[in-house]
C-alpha cells in the first residue's frame, strides 16, 4: 500500500464510521464532512442540471435542498427515471455514505439513472462537495442567503413559446444536427448530455442561446436559426429519449 | 469520345427508364443503396439510411479497410496527446446493430447505365441510389519530383492510417537539431486548418524531445485558416522554432525524395523529415464514375447532395464542390444526414425537410490550448451557402482555451459514435 492509498483507506473507514453516526444520532455539521467552501467550487460541475438554495426548483435534475435523509425518487414534482424510482422503492436513502457512492460513479449505484455525470473519483472532492450540499439540509437553520450572482438564471421564456407542443418526429430529424457533438448515449465527456431533459428546461436553454444570454458561440449559432416550433420539437424528442 | 458515347447511352436509357423505373423499385423486395467509402460521410450516410428506414432499404457499404483511422485527431497523435489506436474505429456495429452489409473491398468502376458498381474482388453490386464519399486523392505532378511512390520517404500523412504513423516515427527518429520541411497544399484541400494544427503539434513534440529542431513551412498561399490564432500560438509557445514562408516565396520548385532535398527559389534545402501535402482532387472512383468537373471535384445539388451529372448518385464530403462548406469531417457528417434524408424520401416516400448544415473545426495549438472556427449553412439553388459563423479570438484566457480543447474531445466522441453507432 502506498501512503496515498493508506490515507484514502483510513478516510473511508472514518467516513463509514461517521455515516453510522449520522442517521442514528445527531446529524453531522458540514465542517465535519469536508470543506464546504471548496465544495461550492466543485458544485459548478452540478449546477447546469441541479439547483440548490433558497429558490431552488427542479430542473434537468431534482433540486438538492434537504437531500440528506431524502429517499431516492422522493420528490413528487420531479420526473425520475424508472431506475431511480425502483431504487427508491427498494429503500435507497441519501445518507452521506450512499451519496458518496453515487457521486463517485452514478451508474454503478443506480444503473440506468438519467444523471449523465461521469462521477468524481477523488474522495476528498466528494466530501467537500457533500459538505457544501450539507449546508442546504436541515433547513432553515443552515441555508445561507444565496448571492444574486451565484447561479445565473436564463431569461424567462414567453409562456406562449413554452406552451408550443413540439413534434417529436420532426425533433428526431432535427436532432441529427445535435448528435454530431452531444452523444445519444448520454455520455458527457467535454460536451454536456442533453438526453432526457425536461422540455421546459430545454426550451429555456435554447432560447437563452438564441438570444445570446448564454455565451457559447457554437450553440448561439445552432440555436440562432431554429424557429420556436423547431426548438419545441427538439425538446419533445430529447425529453422522451432515454439514456441507453 | 468516351464522354459522347456515355451521354448517348444515358440518354437512351433515360427514355426507357421512364417505363422501367417504377416497377424496378416497386418490383424488387427492397430498394438498394450502395455507399462507397466508409469515412466521415459514407459511414454516417450508411448508418442513417439503415437506421431511419428501419430495414426498408438494403444498405451496402464498400470500404477496403477493416478499421477506419480518423484523420481528425491524427495531429494530436503526432503531438503525443493520443495514442494511435484511439483514432481507430471498426465497422462492427454498423453491421450488427443497423443491418448494414459491410463489404471490405475496393470499388473499381461504376456503370451508371446499368446502375452497378464493380469491386476489385470481382463482385458486381446493383443499386437504386449510389452514395459516393471517397474522400480525396492527390493531383499528379502538383509538387514536382513527388509521386505516390515517394510517400514512404516524404509522407503526406493526409489520408488515415499508416502514413500518420510513418511521419510520427520519422519525427521521433530525427537527429538533434534537425530540420522538418512541410510543403503545404494549395486551395481547395481537406481540413483547411489541418496543416497548421499539424505544424503546432510537430513543434510541441520537438519542444519536448528535440528543442533545437526547426520547422520550415513552404506554402503557396498568402493566408490560411485561423492564421492569426496559429501565429499567436507559434509566437507564444514555440518561439523561433517555426518559419512560415507563404505566397510566391513559398512555392516549391521541386522535391528530391531520394536525396531528401527541397528546392525553393533556386536554393537547395536539406530536410531530415519532409511532409509533402500535394494538391487534391476528389477520390479517383468519382472520376471513374464520370461525376467530376474540370477541376476534379464533384458538382452537387445543394439540398440533396445529388450529383449534377447523375441524379441516381449522391456525393458527400471532401469530394464535393459544394459552395461554402469546408472539407472537414464535421461537414461530411452534416451533409451525410441531408443526403440520407433525401435518399429515403426518394426510395420510400418518407418526408423530407429542408436540410440544415453546420461545421465546426477545433484545433489544438498547445497543451490545453484549443481554438475553433465554425459556421452554419443552408442550401440555395446554386450552392451550400454560409449563413452565420464565429471564430475564437486571439488573447483569450487559458480557461476558455482549455474548455475549447475539452469540447473538442467531446466532439470527437460524439462524431465517431454518430458515424459508427
Ligand atoms: C491531418 C488532418 C486533420 C483533420 N482534422 C479534422 C478535424 O479536426 N475536424 C474535422 O472535421 N475534419 C478534420 N479533417 C478532415 C477530415 O478527415 C475529412 O474532411 C473527412 O474525413 C472527409 O470525409 P469523407 O467521407 O469525404 O472522406 P474520408 O473520411 O477520407 O473517407 C473516405 C473513405 O473512402 C474509402 N475509399 C476511397 N476510395 C474508395 C474506393 N474506390 N472503394 C471503396 N472505398 C474507397 C477510403 O478508404 C476512406 O475510408 C482532418 C484531416 C486531416 C488530413
Image (cartoon, rainbow, N blue to C red):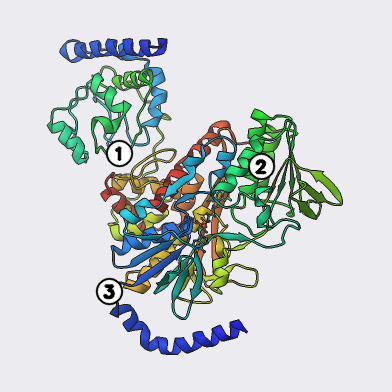
Chain holding disc 3: B
Q: CA distance from mark 2 to mark 1?
A: 44 Å
Badge 3 marks a residue whose secondary structure is loop
Q: Around disc 3, counting alpha carbons within 10 Å, would you say few (fewer than 14), some (14 to 19), or many (20 or more)?
A: few
**Mark 2 near ligand 1 (CB under 8 Å)?**
no
Q: Residue at x 37, y 83 (%)?
A: B21
Dot 2 and dot 1 within a common chain: no
Instruction: Give whichever of B196, B142 is nearer the camera.
Output: B142
Chain holding disc 2: B
Chain holding disc 1: A
Quarter of the image where one finds residue B213: top right
Disc on res. A59: 1
Q: Residue at x 54, y 67 (%)?
A: B285
Say whether residue A156 is left or right of residue B120. Answer: left
Q: Which residue is mark 2?
A: B199
Q: Which residue is mark 3?
A: B29
Disc on res. B390: none
> In the displayed structure, would residue B104 be above or below residue B112?
above
Dot 2 and dot 3 within a common chain: yes
Which of pointers 1 and 3 indicates the residue nearer the eye?
3
| The residue positioned farthest toward the right in the image shown | B266
Badge 2 marks a residue whose secondary structure is helix
Say whether residue B155 is left or right of residue B302. Answer: right
Q: Residue A243: where, in percent of width, then height?
A: 28, 44
Q: Residue at x 38, y 58 (%)?
A: B47
Q: Residue B156: where, in percent of width, then height?
A: 64, 50
Q: Residue at x 78, y 47 (%)?
A: B261
Say whether residue B321 is left or right of residue B306. Answer: right
Amino acid at each position: 500500500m502506498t501512503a496515498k492509498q493508506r490515507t484514502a483507506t483510513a478516510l473511508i473507514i472514518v467516513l463509514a464510521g461517521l455515516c453510522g453516526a449520522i442517521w442514528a444520532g445527531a446529524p453531522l455539521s458540514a465542517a465535519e464532512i469536508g470543506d464546504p467552501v471548496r465544495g461550492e467550487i466543485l458544485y459548478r460541475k452540478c449546477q447546469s442540471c441541479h439547483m440548490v438554495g433558497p429558490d431552488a426548483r427542479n430542473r434537468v435534475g431534482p433540486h438538492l435542498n434537504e437531500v440528506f435523509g431524502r429517499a431516492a425518487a422522493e420528490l413528487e414534482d420531479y420526473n425520475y427515471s424508472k431506475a431511480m424510482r425502483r431504487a427508491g422503492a427498494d429503500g435507497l436513502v441519501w445518507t452521506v455514505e450512499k451519496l458518496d457512492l453515487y457521486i463517485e460513479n452514478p451508474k454503478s449505484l443506480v444503473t440506468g439513472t438519467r444523471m449523465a455525470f461521469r462521477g468524481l473519483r477523488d474522495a476528498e472532492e466528494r466530501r467537500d462537495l457533500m459538505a457544501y450540499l450539507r449546508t442546504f439540509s436541515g433547513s432553515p437553520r443552515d441555508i445561507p442567503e444565496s448571492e444574486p450572482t451565484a447561479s445565473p438564471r436564463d431569461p424567462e421564456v414567453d409562456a406562449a413559446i413554452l406552451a408550443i407542443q413540439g413534434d417529436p418526429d420532426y425533433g428526431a430529424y432535427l436532432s441529427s444536427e445535435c448528435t454530431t457533438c452531444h452523444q445519444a448515449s448520454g455520455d458527457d465527456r467535454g460536451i454536456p448530455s442533453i438526453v432526457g431533459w425536461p422540455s421546459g428546461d430545454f426550451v429555456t436553454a435554447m432560447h437563452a442561446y438564441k438570444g445570446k444570454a448564454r455565451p457559447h458561440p457554437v450553440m448561439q449559432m445552432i440555436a440562432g436559426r431554429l424557429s420556436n416550433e423547431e426548438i419545441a420539437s427538439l425538446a419533445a424528442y430529447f425529453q422522451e429519449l432515454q439514456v441507453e | 469520345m468516351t464522354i459522347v458515347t456515355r451521354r448517348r447511352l444515358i440518354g437512351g436509357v433515360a427514355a426507357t427508364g421512364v417505363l422501367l423505373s417504377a416497377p424496378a423499385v416497386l418490383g424488387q423486395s427492397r430498394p438498394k443503396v450502395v455507399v462507397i467509402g466508409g469515412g466521415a460521410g459514407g459511414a454516417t450516410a450508411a448508418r442513417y439510411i439503415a437506421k431511419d428506414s428501419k430495414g426498408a432499404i438494403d444498405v451496402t457499404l464498400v470500404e477496403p479497410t477493416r478499421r477506419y483511422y480518423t484523420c481528425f485527431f491524427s495531429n494530436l497523435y503526432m503531438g503525443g496527446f493520443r495514442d494511435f489506436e484511439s483514432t481507430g474505429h471498426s465497422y462492427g456495429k454498423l453491421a450488427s446493430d443497423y443491418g448494414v452489409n459491410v463489404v471490405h473491398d475496393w470499388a473499381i468502376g461504376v456503370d451508371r447505365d446499368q446502375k452497378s458498381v464493380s469491386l476489385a474482388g470481382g463482385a458486381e453490386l446493383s443499386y437504386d441510389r449510389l452514395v459516393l464519399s471517397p474522400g480525396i486523392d492527390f493531383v499528379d505532378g502538383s509538387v514536382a519530383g513527388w509521386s505516390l511512390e515517394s510517400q514512404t520517404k516524404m509522407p503526406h500523412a493526409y489520408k488515415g492510417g499508416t502514413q500518420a504513423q510513418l511521419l510520427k516515427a520519422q519525427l521521433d527518429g530525427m537527429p538533434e537539431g534537425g530540420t522538418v520541411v512541410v510543403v503545404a497544399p494549395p486551395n481547395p484541400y481537406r481540413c483547411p486548418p489541418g496543416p497548421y494544427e499539424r505544424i503546432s503539434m510537430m513543434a510541441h513534440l520537438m519542444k519536448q524531445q528535440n528543442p533545437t529542431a526547426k520547422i520550415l513551412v513552404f506554402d503557396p498561399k498568402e493566408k490560411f485558416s485561423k492564421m492569426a490564432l496559429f501565429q499567436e500560438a507559434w509566437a507564444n509557445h514555440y518561439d523561433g522554432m517555426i518559419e512560415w514562408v507563404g505566397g510566391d516565396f513559398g512555392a516549391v520548385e521541386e522535391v528530391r525524395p531520394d536525396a531528401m532535398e527541397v528546392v525553393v527559389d533556386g536554393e537547395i534545402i536539406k530536410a531530415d523529415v519532409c511532409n509533402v501535402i500535394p494538391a487534391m482532387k476528389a477520390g479517383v472512383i468519382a472520376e471513374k464514375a464520370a461525376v467530376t468537373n474540370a477541376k476534379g471535384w464533384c458538382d452537387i445539388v445543394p439540398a440533396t447532395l445529388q450529383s449534377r451529372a447523375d441524379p441516381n448518385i449522391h456525393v458527400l464530403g471532401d469530394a464535393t464542390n459544394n459552395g461554402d462548406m469546408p472539407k472537414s469531417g464535421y461537414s461530411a457528417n452534416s451533409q451525410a444526414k441531408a443526403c440520407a434524408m433525401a435518399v429515403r424520401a426518394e426510395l420510400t416516400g418518407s418526408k423530407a425537410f429542408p436540410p440544415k448544415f453546420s461545421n465546426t473545426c477545433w484545433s489544438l495549438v498547445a497543451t490545453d490550448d484549443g481554438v475553433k472556427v465554425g459556421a452554419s449553412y443552408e442550401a440555395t439553388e446554386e450552392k451550400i451557402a454560409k449563413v452565420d459563423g464565429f471564430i475564437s479570438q486571439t488573447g483569450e484566457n487559458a480557461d476558455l482555451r482549455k474548455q475549447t480543447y475539452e469540447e473538442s474531445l467531446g466532439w470527437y466522441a460524439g462524431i465517431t459514435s454518430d458515424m459508427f453507432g
